[in-house]
Amino acid sequence: MITSPAGAQEKFTALERAVMKEICVRDLAHGAVLEAQLVGATVVSRKNTGAGFYTDFSVSRAVAPITTSEKMIGEVWAEIKGFMDPMTFLIFIEDGYACCLEGAAVRDSTVDVDLGALKFEILPI
């Protein structure tokens, strides 16, 4: 497992940004509130698990919370260049606020993969 150094100022990767934007578009019930939260989101840490990744981030609590009992929202798939299968993505919600993006590979390994350099295409519903 590779974890980004604490305190490093990181930005979301192109894949992370595209996936989160697509989750906002597809989630008719929560998309607008989620998008408002993500506007000022900052990356806290990123972990490459070898089977995907977790990107923890913080959002402003001055923005409205998402009103749901769900702990996860979204389900977006993306074709990743060089992977046999698409990856799936979702956002974790804690106390009404987005806090983590998960990307999960199906059969492919993400060990030694530069997650910031992936070429991808978001798949339609």
Image (spheres, rainbow, N blue to C red):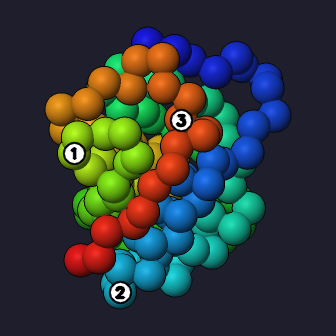
Residue at the disc numbered 1? 85
Mark 1 or mark 3, earlier in chain:
1
Q: Position of residue 98 (x, y in %)?
A: 50, 56
Residue that protrudes farthest toward the front in the picture: 82
Q: Position of residue 108 (x, y in %)?
A: 26, 30
Q: CA distance from mark 1 to mark 3?
A: 16 Å
Q: Measuring 35% from the left and 79% from the top, which residue is drawn there? A: 27
| Residue that carries the numbered disc 2 in the rendered image | 28
Q: Looking at the image, is 111 positioned above or below residue 121?
A: above
Q: Using the image, determine if residue 50 lies above or below residue 44.
A: above
Q: Secondary structure at mark 3?
A: helix
Regarding mark 1 in the picture, which secondary structure is present there? loop
Q: CA gap, disc 2 to disc 3?
A: 28 Å
Identify the residue at image location x=61%, y=54%.
Answer: 14
Q: Nearer the viewer, residue 124 or 45?
A: 124
Q: Which comes before the other along the chain, label 2 or label 1?
A: 2
Q: How many callouts does the rendering have?
A: 3
User: 57 left or right of 103?
Assistant: right
Neighbor class of circle 1 (other Cα within 10 Å; few <14, some 14-19, many 20+) is: some
Q: Which of the two residues, 4 or 30, is positioned nearer the viewer here?
A: 4
The amino acid sitting under disc 2 is Leu
Q: Secondary structure at mark 2?
A: loop
